[in-house]
Image (cartoon, helix red, strand yellow):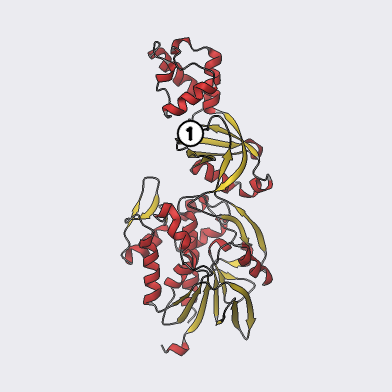
Amino acid sequence: MQERSRKKVIIIGGGAAGFFCAANLDEEKFEVLILEQNSDVLQKVKISGGGRCNVSHACFDPQELVGFYPRGNKELRSVFSRFQPGDMMEWLQNKNVELKIEEDNRIFPMSNSSSSIINCFINEIQNKKFEVKTQQSVQKIIFENEQFLIKTKTNEFKADFLVFTSGSAPKSLKILEELNFKIIPPVPSLFTFNIKDEALKDLMGTSFLNAEVSIPALKMEESGPMLITHWGLSGPAILKISAWKALELAKLKYQFEICVNFLGIDEETAENVFKNFKENNPKKAIGTSKIFEITTRFWHRVLWLSKINLDKNISQISKVEVQNLIQNLCGRTMKVTGKSTYKDEFVTAGGVYLKEINFKTMESKKHKNFYLAGEVLNIDAVTGGFNFQACWSEAWIIAESLNQKF
């Protein structure tokens, strides 16, 4: 096919969705230009998973997969039925990127480096002779003569098809609002809780394998690994609850109470475990007793909170002391006074109203030949590679839809 007969596609946003869409477009049918406002492309891919890039999650049933998305689960069902984590794994492996599934089902490149994914995408774009322009901050999009005119601070570009994958930055959403898209105001999703509590003080790095966290005011509970940080609490249990209740917690201005069960077992079970240990080890000092799966430092802190002397013989612990101990382990109430951005993921709830998108093609219902994918949509997920998978699947559908047009 001759160069001049190719249609022009402009992709606004050089992130995960933008690059993956371009990587799947037919270079014989399309001339493609990616516009990125920053000096670097694929920035989130680079830092994801602590620099290892959590590509996706080993969940291969679309019905089960959508359960990890607080917003967009209904719409993504059809999307994942066409392109799901197994398809993404196959796509990368066909490009000679070896992958591994870790114990928690997160998928990473075998190299443990995000550069494996970044280099794969960039090579694919270069092989197709597609163009990437950085430091191109889009200011305005105009429809004229059945084409799109894209104005940046320094240039103007024309396109037959426009793919909008620029994330949920306020500037991007403002451009879409000017095009009459309905926007759900974005609020942070995955975030950690700022807490000042004696149970956590100076215990940064202490982790719990299966904690339970509840927000009584919102009747919400989550469980999973949890971590004490220098500012409060983090880890999957916290991040999941922050995602599912992102909108409600924003309304509370991130001031609320949580109840934490560090052990992940109910109080009655914990009390029985304590009694059994006491019966079998009556002469042991409480401070050196390894009764529960927690660190010695945290055990000593809980004993201090419960006003129990470390040297006290376990047989001498009173009923009231046991009750205080179990309460601090299985039901400690703490005051959350704010949030912190989770370092590996910056995700927002909010974006383009989903009823304005045709999820068979990811095309806008309002504007012909205008496609959207990624965080610009009101779709988000819990941590674990799910947000990237939504980007890959949506971007793949856009590319498929465009490839089939000619």
Local crowd size for mark 1, using a 10 Å CA cut-off: few (<14), some (14–19), many (≥20): some
Which residue is pictured at 58% across the width and 41% down the height? 194
Front one among 219 and 188: 188
**Residue type at tag 1:** Leu
Front one among 149 and 4: 149
Front one among 379 and 340: 340
Front one among 139 and 348: 139
Q: Is residue 104 above or below residue 150?
A: above
Q: Which residue is mark 1?
A: 203
Q: Is residue 183 left or right of residue 51?
A: right
Which residue is pictured at 46% across the width and 28% down the height? 298
Where does the image place residue 87, in percent across and percent down from the top left?
Answer: 40, 62
Q: Is residue 124 above or below residue 191?
A: below
Query: Residue 182: which quarter of the image?
Result: bottom right
Where does the image place residue 265, in percent across and percent down from the top left?
Answer: 49, 29
- Judged from the image, the secondary structure of the residue bearing numbered disc 1 is loop
Which residue is pictured at 47% across the width and 78% down the height? 32
Where does the image place residue 230, in percent across and percent down from the top left?
Answer: 51, 39
Query: Residue 54: which quarter of the image?
Result: bottom left
Where does the image place residue 116, in percent across and percent down from the top left?
Answer: 35, 62
Can residue 99 be seen by looking at this rendering?
A: yes
Which residue is pictured at 37% across the width and 61% down the height? 115
